[in-house]
Image (spheres, rainbow, N blue to C red):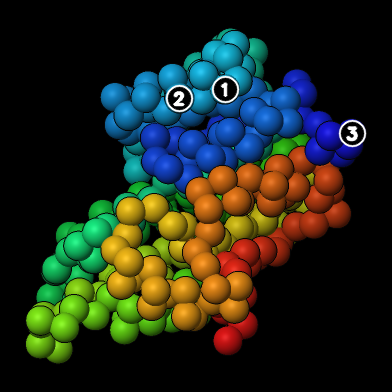
Amino acid sequence: MTSRFNMTEKTALVTGSAGMLGRQHAAALLEVGASVVLTDVNVGNLEVARNELAESFGDHRIRTMSMDVTQLGSIEEVAEKLDSDGVGVDVLINNAALDTKVGEDGLPAGSRLEMFSLQRWNNELAVGLTGAFLCSQVFGTRMATNSGGVILNIASDLSVIAPDQRIYHQTELDHHDQPVKPITYSVVKAGLVGLTRYLATYWPGASVRANALSPGGVHTDQSTEFVTRINELIPLGRMAFPDEYRSVVQFLCSDASSFLTGQNIVMDGGRSVW
């Protein structure tokens, strides 16, 4: 690796580390020498993530900590524990989100705007957007008063385009029963881009950079019909591989992007261009 990508002696904290992309973001930084703090509210899955990463990178640079991003006290407890252990967070990746995934059977019912509950709205914004604000408040403030750092918010191509609800269409259902990508996903991801721009200018001269990464869809266990539909919307003709965002995470979190801040990097195979 070139020296600007080398993150040896840097520590990154990743929220929502038990999820698929959270693990990939952690792996990306482990690849370039960083230590990682894996955080999630799901302790069981967090340990699974740790074990999975340790198989490839060993466990000496991996720490797991239970943290609820919706609770300021939980975040502060983690920050204070790291402080007491002499661990400074150089990179914060705000990845935690409540996202309804498309599986073999498509999207589950119950997300239509007309019936979307206020409780679900509040819960999903609390994790995906308020959680990023609270973590940035706690860890970003420490960065600003120390030697600087990087905040990377994981947004989505749906931060810049509307969801195409046609790709979720199920022929056996009438219009009012069709599953849709929920409104909260678009709101959270667009909000993260706004948060990114705000943070990028909030601590002038403190060497705190903030950027957003807006990935496109990742090919996992979706149905063949869904994959065919979405591939037709992507100029490269396919969805992303799970590990395909690692290099851009390495770029955005390292000194390789030292003059980049306040930007939303859209990496979606070109879908948002059409």
Task: Provide the residue designation for mark 2.
Answer: 52
Amino acid type at circle 3 is Ser
Crowding around mark 2 (Cα neighbors within 10 Å: few <14, some 14 to 19, many 20+) is: some
Amino acid type at circle 2 is Glu
Q: Nearer the viewer, residue 149 or 44?
A: 44
Residue 78 numbered mark, or none: none
In the structure shown, which secondary structural element does the residue marked by tag 3 occupy? loop
User: From mark 3 to mark 1, how far is it between C-alphas?
Assistant: 22 Å
Observer-side mark, 3 or 1, equals 1
Crowding around mark 3 (Cα neighbors within 10 Å: few <14, some 14 to 19, many 20+) is: few
Q: Earlier in the sequence, mark 3 or mark 2?
A: 3
Task: Provide the residue designation for mark 3.
Answer: 3
* Relative height, residue 100 to residue 43 (above, below): below
Task: Provide the residue designation for mark 1.
Answer: 56
Q: Is residue 214 something one can see in this rendering? A: yes
- The residue at 38%/78% (across/down) is 229
Amino acid type at circle 1 is Ser
Q: Cβ–Cβ below 8 Å for labels 2 and 1?
A: yes
- The residue at 59%/78% (across/down) is 235
